[in-house]
Amino acid sequence: MSETELAPEPWAFHLLGLITPFLAISGNILGVIEDQVFVAMGVVFVWGVSPILDIVMGESKVARPPRESGTPFEVLLWVHGLLQLVVVGSFFWFAAIEGLTMWVVVGGLSSGLSGAASATVTAHELGHKKRGSPGWRLARVILFTVNYTHFTYEHNHVHHKWVSTDRDSASATADQGLWSFWLSTIPGQFASSARVHNKRGRRGLRNPSYRGLLLQISALLAIAFLPGEMGWFDGIPVAAGWLVLSAISILTLEYVNYIRHWGLRRSEDEKFSAGHSWNTEARWSRWSLLELTRHSDHHLRSSVPFWKLRPYDGTPELRWGYYASWWPCLIPPIWKRVMRSRLPDNRQ
């Protein structure tokens, strides 16, 4: 059957991505009114259940035509974004009640993984909308909740321009393991985002990257000390939990950057092609992460919304979906052993 004879996939498949934030919210609430162990639900689902779903649900073998209407997907993006505010708010409530215990760390991991799987995916999509539009502004709010406000500028103006070259700190070489990539890419992306604004004459505190960092530090200090000074509650556990939440969200986001371009290199004067991104048609990753896995098309047509992204024949394919790649990726020798043979022409 040809693609034109096929019907688009039901949009409702993408509702699966809402499971993670709903589990995080439920866990935070139940952690207050029932037992702290419930805050672990997000961790169990993202790190335990989702890799299994990635494998069990398999890959889509036939590409369906794009959807004509994007209205359900536009609404879904806003649902994801607004749910992130509820995730963070419910976690702050739990942390304020619980105090500085190991369960605040666990709850921070659950809420942070929800931030990675739901919120930052949404912020990535909305960050490509017109500057100043409601969606673009929602992306800014979402990124503030995970203390990574510079991401949109860096991603749009540096990563998309220099992807898979030495000028892009968000593109990993074949020699890099995930841990060393984390150490280089996080400060590297902040520095490159600041340079984008410096070149436009926005220096010092006029630089949005520096202003965003100052705002984040100020918000953390305010949450840590102001509630106690006002006699409301101890803000230290809330601020510490927010740091855990943000850290795991950022690390997971950069893990995704790592697997999307690992080892695929081009020279600065070489045009980007579909072969410079890893792709996967793993259904669970596709549906729950808003087609983030069709990454070649995103770079070739960055203005195209996620529901119209398409796969390309012959592009490098990940061994597993995004969730199932997490655990092998944490052990660089295993990741490299599995993935090197998949590099085009065994490039290194």
Image: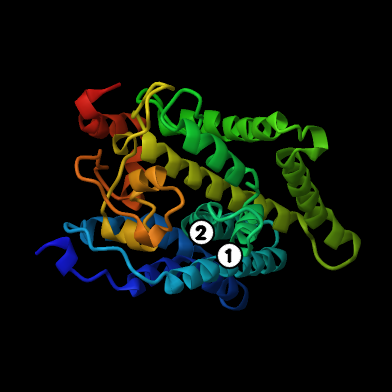
Quarter-wise, where is residue 306 in the image? Answer: bottom left
Horizontal side of 10 relative to 251 (left or right) equals left
Q: Amino acid at mark 2?
A: Thr
Quarter-wise, where is residue 106 in the image? Answer: bottom right
Residue 258: give x, y in percent of width and height. 42, 37
Element under disc 1: helix
> Which numbered disc, 1 or 2, marks the residue that appears first in the sequence?
1
Horizontal side of 268 relative to 147 (left or right) equals left
State the residue at coordinates (20%, 25%): 345
Of the pair 328 and 126, the residue shown nearer to us: 126
Residue 58 versus residue 299 in the image, above or below: below
Given contact means CB atoms under 8 Å apart, are the residues at marks 1 and 2 in contact?
yes
Q: Amino acid at mark 1?
A: Gln
State the residue at coordinates (69%, 56%): 100
Q: How far, Cα to Cα, is label 1 from label 2?
A: 10 Å
Residue 270 versus residue 55 in the image, above or below: above
Quarter-wise, where is residue 265 in the image? Answer: top left
Q: Which residue is mark 2?
A: 122
Horizontal side of 233 relative to 78 (left or right) equals right
Residue 28 versus residue 144 in the image, above or below: below
**Foreground mark, 1 or 2?**
2
Of the pair 102 and 82, the residue shown nearer to us: 82
Element under disc 2: helix
Q: Which residue is mark 1?
A: 84
State the residue at coordinates (34%, 43%): 296
Residue 286 versus residue 152 in the image, above or below: below
